[in-house]
Image (tube, rainbow, N blue to C red):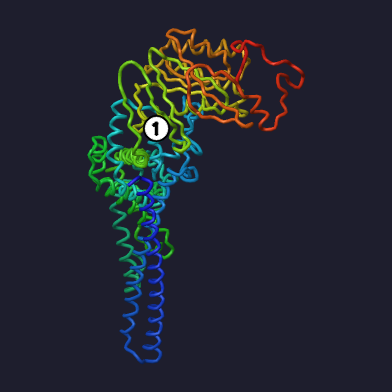
Amino acid sequence: MKPAAELQRLLEARRQSAAQLTRLCERISTARLVAALAGVFTFWLAFVRHGAQPWWLLLPVAAFLALARWHERTLRALDAARRGARFYALALARLDGSWTQHGETGAAFLNPHHAYAASLDLFGPASLFQYLNTARTQAGEQALARWLQQPAAIQTAQDRQQAVQDLGPRLALREDLFRLGDDVRAALHPEALAHWAATPSSLPGPAVRAAAFVLPALTLAGLAAWGLYDSRILFLASAALQALLFYRLRPRVTETLESLAQPARELALVAALLERLEREQFHAPLLTTLHQRIASGAAREIHRLARLVEFSSQANNAFFAPIAAVLLWSLHFAWAIDAWRSRHGGNIASWLETLGEFEALTSLAAFAAVHPELPFPALENGTPHFEGVDLTHPLLPPDRAVANSISLNAAQPLIIISGSNMSGKSTMLRTIGVNAVLAFAGAPVCARSLSLTPYALGASIRITDSLHEGSSRFFAEITQLRRIAELARGPLPLLFLLDEILSGTNSHDRRIGAAAVLRGLLRLRAQGLVTTHDLALTRIADSITPPGLNLHFEDQLEAGHITFDYRIRPGVVAKSNALALMRSIGLDVAAGTSEEGISAPPADPLNSREVP
């Protein structure tokens, strides 16, 4: 069965289950009402009319309690069914294009100074991160974002490939992880929790803790003596000492408890996620390694910490607060939490990191599972090269994506793509860049095949001016070009993707500057692609050694409308439909002249002609 059909079948099954459970909940609610009314009637009959034995009241009470418990279990099952339906609905949304309306965008991870993240739309609305991410915790999101921004070494990426292949068929596991609870990315911060775990204890030692056990016992004994013998001395003395002890320790107790009050519920979910992963048997080496990190009781210990935090919060209950004060409840649980921290605090960072890696791998596996036709790339050592056959962009619907092939190697290090705006030049650069990102994250790629070596990736595609920073578009672009040039001096060969290079300056400076930048990058053994609508820049391909390659995208004017087929072709673009396009949207553009009567461009297109 095709992935879409299987997902739709499971979605309908979960919806049907949710509908059945909803009807069952309604019937149980009605039965509870009947049991309650029966209880009221039995009470009236037994105690008002004296027409029944009082023990008869136990029957409706027992029925009501049993129905209440059944109702609670049914509500939990209903919630799980609804979450399951949402899980499959979101999976289908990634296939039908409506995924942009759901999920985290990852905007918090966007660094405008990153070498390629902004240009390749890795984060933000309708981004690659939003498309891939299925993580429930902030640790999982951080791991996925890190993998997208930091290309892995070949062995690491290959290990992830095997893990993704192992996780791909485990649809039930992914559904279980999704159904376990609400998202916890907002409240559970891995860094803060790890910092808490590493903080030394501020509570006093065993002697004071022993006193904290003795004083409540004395207070209770004094309370009993007061009631039995009207002697208040023991109670007042022990209560005063107890109050003094709590007053002296209150700031440290509050610090210990409040540091975990916010993520208490989230800790319970983390424990549930780890517990579910513990039960799974994996085959891929990376997954078995991760599994070993949590198999030694991580879920059990985090569950215990969550329960300690939950019990400690009972001191805030208005009905229980007087008893909690007498028992020094908060103080004892602060010590228990502190003891937990001393035993297991050093493992928290590793446990959360492991969970995050599991979730990042699960995100990539979900992508692979709904696209079984996509291959994993061949990651190779040796002479730098990028050989992509029928590449497409993962965020484009399959019915709109047009496949194109690109080859970069030592014999052909530079490709210049010419063509008009909207013809597909920028999308081609993003397609290459995003597939390189997927490849070194460990995911399948959108291609018939892709073979590549490790690269440092640099892109200048989405460049804008900044009013806040007081920089023009041209300044922002040359700043990004400097970052890319610095990457070229690093240990890895550079793969550069430059869109409309230096378009923010005049034609003369642009041509000199572009040629200098490209020659400088190529001298550092970089490889890459440049797009332009300034046809004079296409001459650079012939002026370097080894020579570069000119490719182009075309547009067609049909019945007054511009159309694009988005297929890349050899050579330099031969025509421009810019004026026709301007006229097609209602601009009054006279053929051959401007409004001021300036004549059309000179006849030599390679000296001055630009294609919009």
Q: Nearer the viewer, residue 452 or 192?
A: 452
Q: Which residue is mark 1?
A: 446
Q: Nearer the viewer, residue 256 or 428?
A: 428
Q: Is residue 238 above or below residue 561?
A: below
Q: Farthest residue in the front direction?
A: 559
Secondary element at tag 1 = loop
User: Seen in the image, is 54 located left or right of residue 581?
Assistant: left
Say which quarter of the image contains residue 284.
Answer: top left
Q: Residue 148 at what x, y percent from top left?
A: 40, 31
Look at 38% across and 81% down and name the residue there: 39
Q: Residues within 10 Å of mark 1 (few under 14, many from 20)?
A: many
Q: Is residue 431 above or below residue 77?
A: above
Say which quarter of the image contains residue 214.
Answer: bottom left
Q: Nearer the viewer, residue 507 or 231?
A: 507
Number of marks: 1
Q: Farthest residue in the right direction?
A: 596
Q: Is residue 52 visible?
A: yes
Look at 23% across and 38% down and name the residue there: 288
Q: Residue 171 at what x, y percent from top left?
A: 32, 47
Look at 39% across and 72% down and name the residue there: 27
Q: Is residue 9 above or below residue 188?
A: below
Q: Residue 230 at what x, y percent from top left?
A: 35, 73
Q: Amino acid at mark 1?
A: Cys
Look at 26% across and 35% down and name the residue there: 286
| Figure quadrant of the C terminus | top right
Q: Is residue 200 visible?
A: no
Q: Residue 504 at what x, y percent from top left?
A: 61, 20
Q: Nearer the viewer, residue 198 or 353?
A: 353
